[in-house]
Every structure is written in structure tokens, then in C-alpha cells.
Amino acid sequence: MYAPYRPSYLRFAALLGFLAVAAVGGSVIHPVVGLAPILGIGVVWVVHSVPIRYPVLVLTYLVLAVDYGPDRPQSGFWPSPLAPIGDLLFTQLNALTKIPVLRFPLIDGLIFWFLGLAVYRRVTKSPLEPNLPPMPRPLAIMTALTLISILAMEFRGLARGGDFKNSLWQWHQGAVLPFIVAMYHYALRGPEDWPILSKIVIAAGITKALVGSYFALVVVPAMGIEVEYTTSHSDSMTFIFCVLVVLTRFIEKPKLAHVLRGLGVLAFIVPGMIFNDRRLAYVSLGGCLMAAYLINPWTPLKRFITRVLPFFVPIIVVYLAIGWNRSGGVWGPAETIRSLIDGQGGEGNLDYRDLENLNMIATWDQFPILGTGYGHEFLEPYPLPDISFVFPTYRFHPHNSLLGLLAFGGLIGYTGVWMYIAGTVYFAVRAYHRSTVSEYRSAALVIVGVLASYVNQVFGDMGIISYICTFLVAMCVAMAGKLATTTGAWPIPNSALIPPPARAPEPPPGAIVYSNPGEPPTPAVAVGGGGTTPGSQEAPPPAALRDGSATG
């Protein structure tokens, strides 16, 4: 007889003791570091015991919901309760642990850890990970081309004497994007994971909206200050994602439940957008709705909008004419539209962004094909206000990241880095028109909208170096590929998802087989191990013989 198994209480006590000592020791460095051992063991247990999509979904929520330090959340005046988690995710680990070699943020380590674990499970055919639709090969190539182009721009910049240390911050998030796409590709099963993914993003958007609303309504009045924004610039993309999910679900399947749930979401998201006060958010939302209108077929709703909208054009023109030189209150939208056209420098004057854009064009004009390469500052033939006292490396990081790509990479680098955007929109639109599932069609419209808002964010701000924007885009790229292959918008060559047709049992030697209905029976000829001649089982026998009324 075997002795009964008794748990090792000594090992358990030793583990608790180790965690306690590690937590106390880590707290001396940073409060969050004190929790790192406990969180580390918990993460290791989770990722080895549950499907990888669950920790990836948790990571998605944290990236979008916590404070992202480089964006100076809450205008730099107030850290939210989630700020310590943001510090842990986005701060260089060498600054937290005092270990010089750890010159990367925890978020990078988690991305590669989850990706490596997901690939390992696929290779070993782990039962935790089911089969998944492959990504269309052209989209995979275009996504990989992003990394190749960035590295080529880096080598070119270094060859021209560029600053390696500053160049890393110019392309870091862009180079990580293909790996985040791969992480989502291997973690998500297919379009059936879109509902839970969209709910995670909406939960993060509501979290940010609540933080921004509290900051605007409670903290700002108490401090007696004026702020430019309440959460961060990049949160505009999260808010737009939430609004698009609500609107596209109703567009694709109008029903009362979608209206009620949508209004509940908008009740939180819209105040968050208003308090955040980003003009790009409204411009992007308008562009997203225009894209959805153009992609959508001629449904009754689209016909109604097309017939009614012309009647509002004169009203809009009169409103803008009256409110062009007014501000505040009901004229707020007119003021925003004017600021987009005239700039913040006023009519006839160039503001900071205008001058910076002219400098970027002048830099691009130096090397229009290959660009300057990374590690170089943009030229300043049009003098800018000196902001080096708050942003010493501002000439490495233009606000207009789109023109920055042209200046640093030229036409070749720009095309290589951003080709995946055109490919993602292409596959999403193809999937939209070939899907009969309203949820999938809604997902395709949201994907197109997110890519459109990303282009706006990159053009109007430094969205290309934001983890928030990068994660939203990466999940949309991965999901567009899954939609395309699942809906048949892109063929799957030699797919392991489609099992081979079952081989009919071989008849015994001498049996009668029927090549085609209506043709005389032919005896089977044994080939090798008792098989039949090719083509002898192309179709079942006639009905009269299948039901037993006749025999061979």
C-alpha cells in the first residue's frame, strides 16, 4: 500500500516566507515593486493554467485604463488611483529596480512573454489553445514590413551620424507593433472573441471617462487651476472606439436592446470626451462616421440619412456664419471648427503646429526618397518657440508624426511603415461585405474607424509613440485578418481548419461499384492492397439500388 499524500506544509511556509521577505525588501525600492513577487507568481500560475487570451485581455484593459505617464495624464497635476500600476507597466524597470541592465518597461516584457507562450502552446498543440484562423499572408507581410522599414531607417540614420539613444524613442512603439499584432493573433480564437474584446475596451474607456470626469468636477475646482485636458491625448482613440461600437451595432442590427445598452455606455463616454476637450476626437469621429456611411450598403437607414441630410446643410452654414466669431456655450462647436481651420494662432497667424509642419516639410525636402533616417533632429528654418526647458528632445519628436515619418524615412520608409494600414482597411472592408453576422460587420466598421482615427492622431499629435494607440491599432489589425479568413473574404490555402474529406471505405475485390448514376455497373479492380481504380467512387449509386430494391 502507498502512503497517503500529505501536502508539504514546510514548503508552503517557506514560500510564504520568501514572498514576505521579497515584498518587504521590494517596498523599500518602490511600493509597487513590493507587490511584484506576489503578482509575478500569480501571473506565472495564470498563464500556465488558463488560455492565453485571458491574460492578454487583462493586459489590454490595464494598458488602456491606467495612467500612461509619457502622455502626462490629467495635465500632469493629479495621479489617478491607477497611477502606480501605470508606473509599473510603462516606467523603465531599471528606474524601479535599480538594475542597470533592465532598460525596458514591463509592458515590453509582458508582450514578448505572452507571445512566446502562445507560440509555444501552438507548436506543442496544447489543449488550452484551440485552432485559430490564419492571418492573410499579404497582411502578415505588410505588418512585418513595418519592422523591416523601421530598422532600415535606423541603420540609415546611424550611418549618417545619428544619435542612437534618441533614435530608440523615435521608433520604439512602432517597432513593437508587429509583435503586439502577433500576440493578439495567437491569443484570440477568431471573430467570436470580438464581443469580449470590445467589452474590455469599453470598460477601459468608462474607467478613463470616470477618472477624467472626477478630475474635472472635483480636483480642478479644488486646486483652482486651468487644465488643457483631463486624461490624455491618446485616450481620444479609446473613446472613439467605444462610441463606434455603440453606433455600428445599432446600424447593423437596430433593436431596442442595442439602444439601451448604447445609451448606458455613452452616458459615461461622452462626458469623458467633452472634459478631455480634444479637437482631434471630434474630427476623428466625423471621419469614422463618413467611412461607415460610404462602406455601408444602401440600407433603409442610409437612404433616410441621404434624403434628410441636405435639408440640414443650410442650417449648418447659417450656424457657422453666425457663430464664427463667437465662443462658448452653444457656439462651442463653431469655435472648434474655426480653430481647426485658422489654427490657434488666430486668423492670418501661424501657430506652433503650423510652423512645426513647415519645418518637417523642409526636412523632408532634403532627402525626399530615403529621408534623414532616425537619430536626427528636424530642421528649423522657421524658428519655433523654445520649449526645450520642458521637452529637451522636442526636435526628435515632432507632434505631426505623419510628416515626421516622411522626414525621417522619405517616401520609401513612409510607405513601408504604413502599408499595413491600407492592408488592414482593405481586408476589413472585404470581410464586411462578405459577412452575414451583424456582430462581425460591426467589428469591420469599428476597425476601419479605429485606423482612420489613428491616422488623425498621428497627424495631429504624437500618436505613433503612444502605447495606447499602438495597442488599439494592433488588435484591429489582428482581428481584420481573422475576419477576412473566417468570412471567406480571403482564401485559406492548405488550411488545417478545414478537415480533409472522409475517404470512403474501399469495396472488397469483385464488388459492384457505380461510377455515375445511370451508367452500367463495373466490377472493382483491385490495385495494390485491394483498392479500386481511380474515379470508381465519384457518386453514390442510383436510388433504386440504394434502398435495396435491386442488387448487383
Image (spheres, helix red, strand yellow):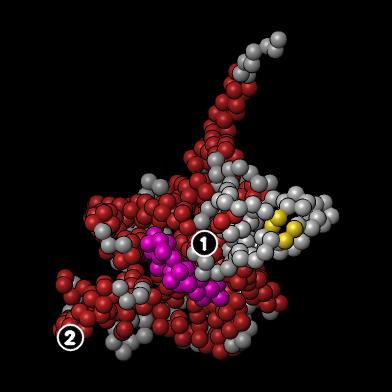
Image point (31%, 89%), residue name: 348
Q: Is residue 422 magenta?
A: yes
Residue 522 falls in image quadrant: bottom right
Select label 1 or label 2 by which is in front.
1
Task: Determine the residue located farthest toward the front in the rendered image.
Answer: 550
Q: For mark 1, what is the residue?
A: 486
The magenta span reads: 419-447
Identify the element where label 1 is drawn. helix
Mark nearer the N terminus (1 vs 2): 2
Image coords of residue 258 (percent x, y): 28, 57
Is residue 522 shown to the viewer in this render? yes
Identify which residue, 509 or 51, lies in the foreground: 509
**Type of amino acid under label 1:** Thr
Identify which residue, 236 or 450, lies in the foreground: 450
Residue 374 falls in image quadrant: bottom right
Please state if 147 lies on the left or on the right of 73 as rendered: right
Q: For mark 2, what is the residue?
A: 314
Image point (61%, 82%), residue name: 412
